[in-house]
Amino acid sequence: MNQAYFAAKEAKDTASVLLSRADTWFKHLYSNGYYDKIRASWMAYHGAYYGEGHDITFGGEQGEFSQMAVNHYRNIADLMTTMVTNVRINYRARASNSDSKSIIQTDLANGLLDYYVRQKRVEKYVHDAVKQAVVLATGYVKMEWNATTGDIYDYHPETGAPIYEGDIEFTNLEPFDVIFDPNKANSHSHEWVLCRSFKNKFDLAAKYPEYEDKIKELATKTDYMDYRSMFEFPNKHESDEVPVYEFFHKKTESMPEGRYLLFLSTDIVLIDMPMPYRRLPVYRVSPSEIMGTAFGYTPMFDLLPLQDALNALYSTVLTNQHTFGVQNIYVPRGADIQLKALEGGLNIIEGNTGQGKPEPINFTNTPAEVFRFIEMIEKKMETISGMNSVVRGDPEASIKSGSAMALVQSMALQFITGLQTQYVFMVEDIGMGIVELLRDFADVPRIALIAGESNLSYVRTEFTGDDLASIDRVIVDIGNPIAVTTAGKMQMASDLLQYGIVKTPEDYFTVLNTGQFTSFVEDSQRQNNFVKRENETMLRGGAVPVLATDSHMYHIKKHKAILDDPDMRDPSNPAVQQVLNHILEHVEMLRSTDPGLLSIMQEQPLGPAAGSPPAPDQMAQDPNMSAQPQGGVVDPSMLQAGQPQMPNMPEMPEGAMPVPEVIPQG
């Protein structure tokens, strides 16, 4: 018996084992009923309860039963999807170091991630994957590098073949298109994955002419309808698409280089190479797991019987109303009433006295228990799914205040925390995957049109993968669940207005409409990054100029933090002298800068070194008061304990704002 690992065999043998495992995998889905659940959920979501249309149909032996579907199932599934994905993806890259170079790379990574989210429609693929996870229990996004896409950067010097920039491609895969080891106890321990997609066989034949005849003879997509969740059409439509299989194996002890295999059949192996990616390029999301397995589970499975019962009850009511909606009339035997006397309206009907009168017979009264049962099932569907009446837009009469509605709505968000957590994990993995693909494959310089006007100082005209070398992780901000509700946004906007962060009506309505306020703190973040770069420069012994428009008090506190280190207490260290001189230049700016400018910047002006700050009118009346201090440098002896000497003020740095001359009055 051959005990060799199947993934390490010859390409044809590995392809043969994979196709055999795929066939066994599909049969396993059929035998355990998992396929039927997924297919039933797909049909219910698309309203295919009584046939493939959305019409009222008639069943029974003689068509006497009216069939009508009221699709709460789709409404609940869409609400669950929307509540998880309604907040736009906000990536934040993190670097392994905190130096200024890493900070610049972080800003570049953030801009690139934002570009892929909005311009490359990553959000669309993620949204579709979440919808598949809600309806089909599992959703997938496949992300790969395509070296033959993008603009032509150059031509190969020998062959003349074009060299493209290359770019990342995204694809959604159905649960039936991702095959894995069904024996795994969870979805996080896969060493390999087999993906199936469908492509035009004539395009493949043109790209791989050596296999042209074999490719054209392959079974097409039409023959694989049993392994998909779509409608079964009465007449099969012939397709030109054939299945394409991609096998990805991680780098492990048994497969140090991993493996990538692209094949159409056992005899048509197109690519066989080491694994080109750092991780499996298939990203998964699922509301929950079937315990002890790697298969996903969705609460929508639990709603299937309730939706069927609801359709049956509505159909019962409709059948009764449809059959007996036109009333019948009871006339006692022997009554002298002709049928013509009942036609039309405003007629005088005469009959023999004592022989009774015509009376209507009402068969349309449906028992009240039927309507109560309908209400109970609808309520149970909301309870099981967590999508309460407030979320569905039909709040109960007892819920009247806006704060109560916001609380109830946030409870629905908390109910689907499991799905939201898996969503965040997938989005973070995709973000890190984007950075890794660009780092590993973006060899040629690429134009980075990613920065807006507010980030003008970080605009890069071009970049390569090396410019992302410091990025080691990517995280996603989701925030408080109540912050995505209308009531939550209103409360947040009011709080920001109260604390002075929001200062204009435009900013208030921005928070109210979007729930985002990061643009209001961009200046603070940029200033923090700038001060870090100043500190790094001074630690290397370099000089940094001080400008009158700096936030002096903020700079002084941040620069002082450098000296809060025993190793930085050596007076002979030139970096220490440089930091102290720089701090005192900020102090001098607080004394010499126009008080009006300092007031605009919300800085507190300082008086002369000899005393407390004088009042502005005193400065104008005292001709002997001068705002010009004596220049100088810091005496190193001031650093020694027990000698609290007042240092001489440094000379004004070149280019600083001059001190205006005080003209005495009178």
Image (spheres, grey):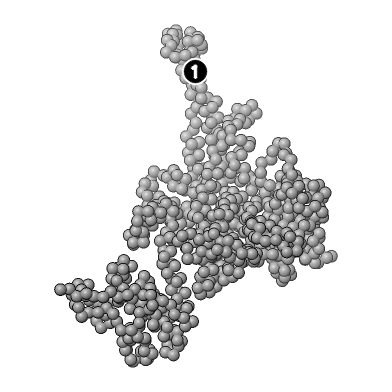
- Residue at the (58%, 33%) spot, across then down: 55
- The quadrant of the picture occupied by the N terminus is bottom right
From what the image shows, is residue 160 above or below residue 642? above
Q: Amino acid at mark 1?
A: Ile
- Camera-nearest residue between 375 and 153: 153
Residue highlighted by disc 1? 329
Q: Where is residue 641 shown, x and y percent of the image?
A: 36, 91
Q: Is residue 194 visible?
A: no
Q: Residue at x 71, y 36 (%)?
A: 234
Q: Position of residue 595 (x, y in %)?
A: 28, 71
Report the front residue among 87 and 231.
87
Residue situated furthest right in the rendering: 1
Taking the image as drawn, is residue 486 in sight?
yes
Left or right of 506? Residue 323 is right
Please tell me in which quadrant of the rendered image residue 312 appears: top right
At a point 42% along the width and 10% down the height, the residue shown is: 348
Density class for disc 1 (Cα within 10 Å; few <14, some 14-19, many ≥20) is few
The spot of residue 397 in percent (x, y) is 39, 43
Left or right: 14 as drawn, with respect to 593: right
**Number of marks:** 1
Q: Residue furthest left?
A: 666
Question: Observer-nearest residue: 22 or 581?
Answer: 581
- Disc 1 is placed on an element classified as strand
* Residue for point 76% across, 53% down: 207
- Where is residue 583 shown, x and y percent of the image? 38, 79
In the image, residue 466 above or below residue 120: below
Answer above or below: position of 540 versus 22: below
